[in-house]
Image (cartoon, helix red, strand yellow):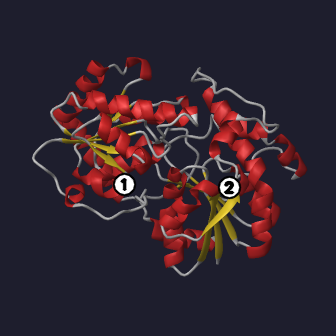
Amino acid sequence: MKILFVAGGSAATVFALAPLANAARGAGHEVLMASVADIVPVTAGVGLPAVSMTSTPLRDFIYRDRDGAPVTPPTDPDEQPDFTGRWFGRMAAATLDALTALAHDWRPDLVVGGTMMYAAGLLAHRLGVPYVRHAWDAVEATRIDPGGERELAPELASSGLAGLPVPDLFIDVCPPSLRPPDAAPAHPMACRPANTQRALEPWMYTRGERTRVCVTAGSRVANDDGTAYLREAYVFLRDLALDVTALDAEVVIAAPESVAADLRAELPGVRAGWVPLDVVLRTCDLLVGHAGGVTTLNAMNAGVPQLLLPQWGILGPPTRRLAEHGAALTLQPAEAGRERVAESCRELLTRPSYAERADALAQEISEMPPPAELVGVLEKL
């Protein structure tokens, strides 16, 4: 069987799909993974055959409309889901022809698309093959999809569709206890870490005597003037690390190597760089970060309590559910002063209930069907 996986414009989207893709390859199926060009090395880095579906970088879909005119992301959290759906819709429109050409040459039997990769469903509809929607994280797409549907109105009409294609199967990696009561029916699958690796140093897989806190803002961070939103992510990460250094703890900053030297220079004594989160998180007592969905799931998988500062409205509901479950605390950006961050970290580190609830979530994830079991479900489709 040939299976085409459609990732997105960030490393996290590749990491989310890689466990099932690798399981399918291990079972003897042919697999390709498509993504934007600058993420192709990430796909290759997790051991998967990689194909570019567009040379346009992710930021162009976010900050420009189809005609190339600048668009400004809304600051109102209620408007952000529609905005997100629209730029994912623009990505789908820009990649559909390239994916169709790929399918003409390679002829997949099945298309698996990440949560908001709407081109996957449209491609499967064109080909007349099954379409699988694969959740990247615990973010619900119900508020995001309408924006994507509006943006893709011309493509949907030309395909004879009244709305976004309905998947033949929805795979959800969200632990059952964190799923909303009205969530769409889904086949559960345990999330498994799939980040790129590097040569390990002993500190990465051993615990020291001090409390260890991991701080991250994800993979899209840059300390230059070229792209405003990457620079903003760097400032957020640096300031967050400064807040955490107020604790008597060892601080590990998970960040691209391109900014690691700057972080080490600004924050003497911290460890900073691209670290394998699947290894390092198991030696940590706390994760402090931007609430990115895949990073958050990795921490759940490792049984680590979290302090989350969601930067986008779409991240609010899943982080609140995690906090209500007792495995995390959340702070809105306006609340995240240095004293409040330090105080929240101390609470998470000193009150045993947070670690207990985080351990319970890790146990729940371990009991969910593994990716290898889902391969059989794909075969039946």
Give 181 or 278, whichever is nearer the viewer: 278
The residue positioned 50% from the left and 43% from the top of the image is 220
- The CA distance from mark 2 to mark 1 is 24 Å
- Label 1: few (<14), some (14–19) or many (≥20) C-alpha neighbours in 10 Å: many
Give 153 or 253, whichever is nearer the viewer: 253
Mark 1: amino acid:
Ile
Apparent side of residue 137 relative to residue 147 in the rendered image (left or right): left
* Residue 231: x %, y % from top left: 50, 34
Give 131 or 11, whichever is nearer the viewer: 11
* Residue 339: x %, y % from top left: 26, 19
Apparent side of residue 114 relative to residue 331 in the rendered image (left or right): right
**Can I make out residue 175 in this image?**
no
Mark 2 highlights which residue? 167
Residue 84 appears in which quarter of the rendering? top right
Q: Are marks 2 and 1 in contact (CB under 8 Å)?
A: no
The residue positioned 53% from the left and 73% from the top of the image is 24
Q: Helix or strand or loop: what does disc 2 sit on?
A: loop
Q: Helix or strand or loop: what does disc 1 sit on?
A: helix
- Label 2: few (<14), some (14–19) or many (≥20) C-alpha neighbours in 10 Å: some
Mark 2: amino acid:
Pro
Q: Tell me which numbered mark, 2 or 1, is placed earlier along the sequence.
A: 2
* Residue found farthest to the left: 209
Apparent side of residue 254 relative to residue 131 in the rendered image (left or right): left
* Residue 130: x %, y % from top left: 70, 65
Give 160 or 105, whichever is nearer the viewer: 105
Q: Is residue 323 above or below residue 278?
A: above
Q: Is residue 341 above or below residue 268?
A: above
* Residue 267: x %, y % from top left: 28, 35
Q: Is residue 230 above or below residue 13?
A: above
Mark 1 highlights which residue? 365
The residue positioned 73% from the left and 30% from the top of the image is 70
